[in-house]
Amino acid sequence: MTSFPFKLLAVDGGARTGVLKTPRGDIATPAFMPVGTAATVKALYPEQVRDAGAQIILGNTYHLMLRPGAERVKRLGGLHAFMRWDGPILTDSGGFQVWSLSGLRKLEEDGVTFKSHLDGSSHHLTPERSIEIQADLLGADISMQLDECTPFPCERDAAARSMELSLRWAQRSRDAFGERKTQAIFGIVQGSVYDDLRRDSAEGLKRIGFDGYAVGGLAVGEGFEMMCKVLDATTLFLPSDRPRYLMGVGKPVDLVEAVARGIDMFDCVLPTRSGRHGQAWSDYGPVNLKNARFAEDPRPLDESSDCPASRDYSRAYLHHLVKANEYLGSMLLSWHNTAYFQSLMARMRAAIDDNRFETFRKDFHDKLGQPFD
């Protein structure tokens, strides 16, 4: 019996809609989770994130354990109270961030020892400690197992060793999590670009038993075509009655193609990171508001949008804010992008429910590369 019931509502080809029921609210899938790395979705109020359509956000274990400290968050009422977000929160395990530290970490069977990028202090993260931070101290609704993110490119033998270590850590993470009625835990499939390793990882995770299954180790340099190939091979072995989560992805076209392959949940820093760099997302691809062609354009980004940032401010004004390095430019574009990503997910859910996802998918690809007007 899983902690959070997951009900499939419609299937259209490989794409599917569903609802993941949590004590803090239902999550309609496919769903995109804005990333609240350090207990904030950058440049946005929690109310703006909610009004944009987000049902769940992601918090980052690595950053929160270093600052302000997981024990401090616990003393202040947990992550939900600390950041004033009353909806579900998924936390990552910290594994990806530790992996990215490269020379600042030492990986062993027990866990990983690393130096903080903030002050050089030494820390030891084990599967058990990661679960303690996520579930007990931060109070995450969904915790992730600690894993080793396999780099790309990676020789098969090295990928196999890494995947097997992640499986052992998966068992330890699951044991540390125990049985909880109001919280869930997801396992993470690894195996780089090798189909048989992805299969073995998925089968091993299913034997352990998780509330959901994530696909990790993608968007690390393998490219779009290879990502799709790995997803084709991996989702074959994931349970159809549990949510499937593609970690750290991605661009709108990545989301559309991953949904076509049966993925239910996503996260990525792209909406707010792009917003801070003067970029707005659309069905036509990214739009650079620094471009001089917007200097006297009185039209909004999207007059049909429910988001005030998309609807109520002219492109000329946004261009001015970006060129002048005004904070408001980052805020408005991050708001627009967050709303756009949520709108994209809602439109995909509607298309799947109406059995017209392939038409939606074709129309989406037809627009890509066309000029934004």
Image (cartoon, helix red, strand yellow):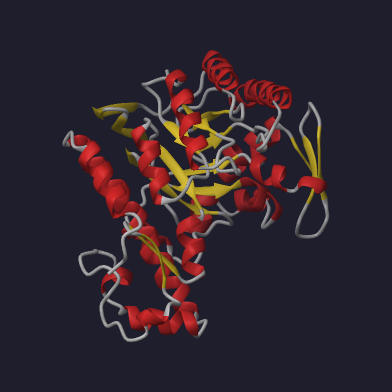
Residue that appears at 44% across and 51% down? 251
Return the residue nearer the eye: 91 or 107. 107
* Horizontal side of residue 183 vs 20, given as left or right: right
In the rendered image, the quadrant that contains the C terminus is bottom left
Residue 254: image quadrant is top left
Q: Position of residue 234 (x, y in %)?
A: 48, 24
Q: Position of residue 23 (x, y in %)?
A: 38, 37
Q: Is residue 128 left or right of residue 339?
A: right
Q: Is residue 103 above or below residue 369?
A: above
Depth check: give the residue in front, 265 or 26.
265
Q: Residue 190: image x %, image y %? A: 60, 28
Q: Does residue 127 sit above or below 207 in this rendering?
A: below
Residue, x 64% and y 42% (percent of image)? 96
Q: Nearer the viewer, residue 323 or 91?
A: 323
Residue under the image location 37 percent in, 85 percent down: 295
Location of the N terminus (image quadrant): top left
